[in-house]
Image (spheres, coloured by chain):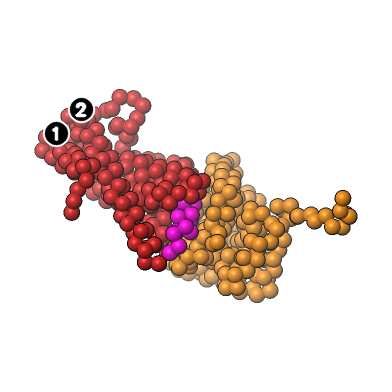
Chain colours: A red, B orange
Amino acid sequence: MKFSKLGIIAIMAVVGTYVRAIFFTPFDALQGPAQKILYVHAPSAWVGLYLAFGLVFITSILYLWLKDPKLDRVASSSAEVGFVFTSVVLVTGPLWAKPVWGAYWTWDARLTLTLFLWFIYAGYLILRGAIDDFEMRARFSAVIGILGALLVPFIHLSVYFFRTMHPMPVLLKPSAPSMPREMLITLVSSFLALTLLFAWLLRERYLLAVDRDAATEAGS
Amino acid sequence: MPPRAMVHRTPGVLASALAITRKDLLIEFRSRSVILSAVAFAVLAITIFFFAWDPTAVASVDLAPGVLWVIFTFSGLLGLHRSFGVEQPTRAIDALLAAPVGREAIYLGKLLANLGFVIVVQAISLPAVALLYNVPIGGYVLPLIGIVLLASVGLVAVGTLFSSMVVSTRLAELLLPLLALPFFVPVILPAAQATARLMNGRPVAEVSGYVSILGAFDVVFLVVCTLLYPYTLDQ
């Protein structure tokens, strides 16, 4: 396999970040080694839930407006890569929660929201698989992409009535980050590394979609 | 100037929508195929849920709200699939689209027919749950009906749109619940919580927060789904 420049940079950033996270970042005083899962969990949530989902929403609206197949390819690629990152969030969360909270899963607001976003991604991808016509597939999935994003505030609101025990954000919040400097550098670099990884995977997936569409067109 | 009789008047959105609603309800009333199975399903589910829990361990007043909303959700899905499915075998939808009515009138007409369908199922399963689970609902029946109606509008608004989409896909029956259920959560959750409060004898004022979530959901998704409906057509 040939790697693009973006791919090489992304892989180096990911390797560098996690070598630093494992060997050169101190343990948390209370949570011990379990806390280190944060360096995978939090940036994956940023990529899967905000970046990828946001991109699906924006490109879906633009697709219905401009009807440019490129926009559908970006939306579907972003949904597929975002689905993987959201799956990582859903796997790493319980692994951390078991030693720290004492249970793998709670029906906490943030957990429930993430789970339902994952279901919406899954529905989006399954719907795409069930339609052969290119134009119809693009149109239908754009509708789901828009409705899914509009659903987020409602899921948030309806589960907000339950208490949340999820740790509050340490990085993406208005006040100064609440973390020692060594950990903070690792965390910031993990956000950058996984964002790069997302950009690379998105680009590769997009190029695959271009090839696939060309192959379908040549075959028909 | 043409003579008066020759001026064609296109009926308004609401009039066209109601005509489509009437057509759908008439078909359903004459065949009674789906409504009877939905009602039978609802009553069967009520009895099955009763035996799925130990009635000596879980008080029926705690069980009833959950049972009620699970039944509303799944019997609603049965009807939603029928909504556009009934047009599919003879491609009657093409005639509907060729008629001089706006797309939004077709969506609203289908929506109202589905709402009627859901209300019939609810009108039977709500008293059935109250009766069989021995939950006296007399004291708060009007607020309860209000919550049920508000929630139904939200469920049907999203469900009608998805029904229109899935009929032209390969996995129609399977895809509808898969796509619709995540969208039902922000409706079912506040509705079931509000129902539980009322059944436990809490004052009506305590459920106002849930009612506003339901209302906001209805408004947002009614508007957005009406706007998005033209994009869900198979053409």
Q: Amino acid at mark 2?
A: Pro
Which disc is residue B78 wearing? Answer: none
Q: Is residue A98 above or below residue A216?
A: above
Q: Residues within 10 Å of mark 1 (few under 14, many from 20)?
A: some
Q: Residue furthest left?
A: A23
Residue tagged by mark 1? A26
Q: Amino acid at mark 1?
A: Pro
Q: Residue furthest front?
A: A218
Residue A163 or B25: which is nearer the viewer?
B25
Picture quadrant where residue A26 is located:
top left
Residue A37 position within the rendered picture, expressed as x and y whole percent measured from the top left: 21, 43
Residue at point 70%, 52% (across, down): B13
Total labels: the figure holds 2
What subunit carries mark 1?
A: A
Tag 1's secondary structure? Answer: loop
Asked whether disc 2 touches disc 1, contact meaning CB atoms under 8 Å apart, the reply is yes
Residue tagged by mark 2? A180
**Segment tinted magenta in the rendering:** A132-149
Residue B151 position within the rendered picture, expressed as x and y whole percent measured from the top left: 57, 52
Q: For the C terminus of chain B, which image quadrant? A: bottom right
Q: Main secondary structure of the magenta part?
A: helix
